[in-house]
Amino acid sequence: MSTVERMAGGLGTWLDDRFGVARGARKLLRKVFPDHWTFMLGEIALWSFVVILLSGTYLTLFFKPSMHEVVYHGSYVPLQGVQMSEAYASTLDLSFEVRGGLIMRQIHHWAALIFVAAIMIHMLRIFFTGAFRKPRELNWLIGNVLFILAILEGLFGYSLPDDLLSGTGMRILEGVLLGIPLVGTYASFFLFGGEFPGQLLIPRLFTIHILLIPALMVALITVHLLLVFYQKHTQYPGPGKTNRNVVGAPFLPIYTAKAGGFFLIIFGLSAILGGLVQVNPVWLYGPYHPAQISAGSQPDFYMGWLEGALRAMPAWEINAWGHTVSLSVLVPALVVPGIFFTLLALYPFIESWVTGDKREHHLLERPRNAPTRTGLGAAGVTFFGLLWLNGGNDVIADKLHLSIYAITWFTRFALFLGPVVAFIVARRICLGLQRRDRDKVLHGRESGIIRRLPSGEYIEIHEPVSVEERYVLTAYEVNRPLELTDTVDENGIPTPNGRVRKVRSALSRWYFGTRVEKPTPAEYQQLTAGHHD
Amino acid sequence: MSTHDEMTTGAEGQAAPSGPEHTSGLVQRDEVRGRHARTVDDIVPAVDGVVIEADDHEFAPVERITPDSTVARTYDDPFPNPGPPHHEPRRTDVDPRAARRADRQVAGMFGLATLLLIGFIVSFVAVDTDQMISLPLVGKIGAQNALFGITIGGALALVGFGLIHWARKTMTAVELVEPRHPLRSPEPKREEGAAAFRQGIEETGIARRPLLIGGSLLAALGGLLTAPLVLLRDLGPLPEKKLRHTAWAVEQRIVYENTNEQVKASDMHIGTLVAAHPLGVEDPNRLAKASIFLIRLDPSEVKSQRQLDWGYQGIFAFSRICPHVGCPVDLYEQASHHLLCPCHQSTFDMVDGAKVIFGPAARALPQLQITADGEGNLMAKGDFTEPVGPSFWERG
């Protein structure tokens, strides 16, 4: 018996005596995890979050969350003698006087960028493969909340140094709060402790950033992972894989080694970026001052779409009965993200209602095999992407020598037309790909071999696809729309909810109306029987 | 009926019946073609002696929701599941030399990581903080920070790559198959659970006095959740009329933003635009509303009579705080007399009362009435006549 085994045995005995861990150990330790590169996206988010927690804890040892004004006397010459908040001064000290402080700050920032980006791509994967379907709707909702929390956490985090760039972001936040009808001024006065900028914002953001939101996120991530563990991971359709099994590698040792290794790689990558690639150089921006501004300033990438929405909105404002409703703030900053996040969160329920599908799904769908969903996803991505691009309209105008007004006008129309076009194109592409798959199953793949027949005719040899590939290409659902039979019962009395059911059946027709049928064995046999070469 | 359906089809290992006869009272528009018969042959053996079933997508049956509509049966794999692919041994499984080489590679990565960590300690102690270094692609950066990144980041990544290499090359590679059971409990268990819950509620006796106990408890809980909200009251003062006034007052002198020196009318040339604020005001809270800019224009170009009246010899003072969301407006184009907010590109026409000609700002920049004292120093005639900055509900 090796030392490792002996030690593990001792620990195991100790734990089992107290907690009875041996009972579930075999099942847990050898639990099967399916493997696919897209399953790594959520892992990137998870591990970058751990990196953020570790590096962030280090930063709190040096950062002073105070707006008390001091005069800078540190080693960064251009700012010597300049008046600034303690928050900004301690960020400079952290960057210039503390050995390793700068890399920790940059690791923290890089990992935060990776975190939000990974969440977004992970969510797209979940969406486009239908992984959110029953029984995983709750985990989709938790993921949505985590996404929103991550964005807020990022915004508050990069605002803490109290530099000119992020301070301008807080000024915009104040403007947005003021724009809320009825309670806006109160919300703003309560957050800032009075008028902007006040003395309290940074310490308050600090508490929210290092305690409130992280605690919520840790709790939600724990539930998120437990649910993945309990419900077992989804898998892509493939040979040997069914809706009733999980095929993959055991938790110990393969999954543990790979996941642990992957965490270290994410950490390593953040550290290499933090050491070599500058991010958020706050000393170049200077301390925040409400009467200063710099042109071409950009928020972190995940705020860009809201910035773009603010920029695209026309100057609409309602003044009536002694009150003002600032639509040019309210719509882009609250209504648009509100609708976007609501639709995103409710999508699993909407789809299940429209399609009438209430079954358990553990096999993922290839995006092409759910053309309408893929089209909707493409529309959403287009909408988000256009807003995001418009958030950089000044940079685009500058670099490409375009009129900033022309870009904004383009965005205003494209926001409505772009998603529609994206939907139609994406759905078409999906249907086309389905037809190609069908073709491949029935006629085989093009071998590139051209044969000349005795008659002088040229034909290309098609090779039949393997049994495994044929299975993968046909293991999916072709759904049919819900059919409305009667809106009146046998006595001629309208059945309840007649209108709702009409809407639902219309939506269902729209969802499943256009489809490509799967090849059947009969078709296959008919075709292959005729081919004797 | 759907419960009955689920009961029978949801049971483990049972082939799921489907077809029109099971959708009693429902219309199925399109019979699925080429249904693959489920037979014993569909049970395919997997590795490790675990038996898996052929694909069965009727895991839980389609639920019929409305009395007269249905999801027509949809799913079928026309071709049988061929079962898991044959396990191909890796090179390291069959060639001991390859396995030893993989072991050496893994140990090499772990060893190199340790060396890098020593390098990290050395760079912490021995490298000067303000030493710079030029690296390809990234340019000139702090040497110590770069070394930290390379050593720590490299060590972390190497241990990570080592672990994954180990897992891929020499750890036993088995593809395991684990059965998946329907998540919902079998019907008797559901009944048991519901009964236990009902019993628990029954034993509280709440059904006998729902209003007295239940109602008062709900009210108290509601109170517990809402009453502490008053504690948030002192987060800040009430807005009152604070957003309506700024630091500007009668004869308040105007100073340059950067130098705090008084602005003389004679300093301003046509086309000049400078940022300014009230003399003696340093508090950021007051500056956040009182910040202005002064601009001198050729009066014959100015279209707005009010703008002319409120200015002094072609010098005009406007709030610098954008009425959209409060950024200081700053980008002035002399030729067109357009002033642009760098945040969201609201554009103001400086020869027409700072009217908005593009962008999300809904109102012109408020103008400050100015004049000059006997020495030619510019000063305000009073406060702004309207609130400056972003719109708010009570603004009107």
Image (cartoon, coloured by chain):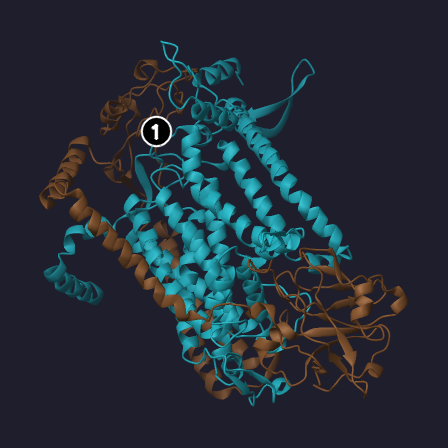
Chain colours: A cyan, B brown
**Furthest residue toward top:** A491
**Furthest residue toward right:** B300
User: Is B267 rendered above or below residue B306?
Assistant: below
Closer to the camera, B112 or A475? A475
Residue at position x 35%, y 65% from top? B230
Few, some or many C-alpha atoms within 10 Å of disc 1 (few <14, some 14-19, many ≥20)?
Answer: many
In which quadrant of the rendered image does the N terminus of chain B lie?
A: top left
User: Is B372 rendered above or below residue A54?
Assistant: below
Residue at position x 65%, y 39% from top? A417
Residue A343 x %, y %? 48, 42
Closer to the camera, B389 or B11? B389
Closer to the camera, A101 or B184? B184
Residue B18 x %, y %? 32, 19
- Horizontally, is A282 left or right of B29 in the view? right
User: In this figure, which residue is indicated by the disc labeled 1?
Assistant: B57
Q: Secondary structure at mark 1?
A: loop
Q: How many marks?
A: 1
Callout 1: chain: B
Residue A533 x %, y %? 54, 18
Residue at position x 51%, y 67% from top? B239
- Residue B105 visible (yes or no): no
Residue B225 x %, y %? 30, 57
- Residue A102 visible (yes or no): yes
Q: Amino acid at mark 1?
A: His
- Horizontally, is B327 left or right of A64 in the view? right
In which quadrant of the rendered image does the C terminus of chain B lie?
A: bottom right
- Horizontally, is B185 left or right of A328 in the view? left
